Amino acid sequence: MASGVGTATVDFGAWPGSNEASVAVTGQPGISATSAAEAFLMAEASGVHTAADASYVGLFMAVSCGVPAAGTGFTVYARAGYKLTGTFKVRWVWSD
């Protein structure tokens, strides 16, 4: 069962965009350095992107989490094979 659940937004910026984006997830006082964190995509609108855009962006973009900092949180990283623009919502969970 997840101990922490939430959403974050990764921003690839304005045109011409970027291949990489990240966002810090903070405010997680119960997280430890050995907790497991996971990020994933859902088909939901964000910024200029529709839910349909979000349902297909997984073909071009992967998300992963950095090692947690105890009592603080972790970073969600998004990387794409092509330059992307704008924001995408990312869901995350963590547990011990």
Image (cartoon, helix red, strand yellow):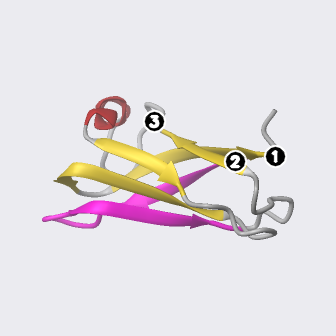
The residue singled out by tag 3 in the image is 44
The residue singled out by tag 2 in the image is 36
For the magenta stretch, what is the residue range? 5-26
Q: Answer whether residue 35 is magenta in the image.
A: no
Of the residues under marks 2 and 3, which one precedes in the sequence? 2
On residue 96, the disc is 1
67 relative to 3 in the view: left or right: left
Instruction: Answer above or below: position of 24 versus 64.
Output: below
Quarter where residue 91 is shown:
top right
Of the residues under marks 1 and 3, which one precedes in the sequence? 3
Instruction: Answer above or below: position of 16 versus 37.
Output: below
Depth check, front residue: 25 or 38: 38
User: Separation of disc 1 and disc 3 at Cα?
Assistant: 28 Å
Instruction: Answer above or below: position of 60 versus 16.
Output: above
Given this view, does label 1 or label 3 mark the residue nearer the observer?
Answer: 1
* Residue visible at 82% across and 45% down in the picture: 3
User: Separation of disc 2 and disc 3 at Cα?
Assistant: 24 Å
**Element on which disc 1 rests:** loop
**Element on which disc 3 rests:** loop
| Local crowd size for mark 1, using a 10 Å CA cut-off: few (<14), some (14–19), many (≥20) | some
Q: Residue furthest right?
A: 30
Give yes or no for contact between labels 1 and 2 (Cβ–Cβ under 8 Å).
yes
**Kind of residue at badge 2:** Ala
Type of secondary structure dominating the magenta stretch: strand
Give yes or no for contact between labels 1 and 3 (Cβ–Cβ under 8 Å).
no
Quadrant, the N terminus: top right
**Kind of residue at badge 1:** Asp
Quarter where residue 71 is shown:
bottom right
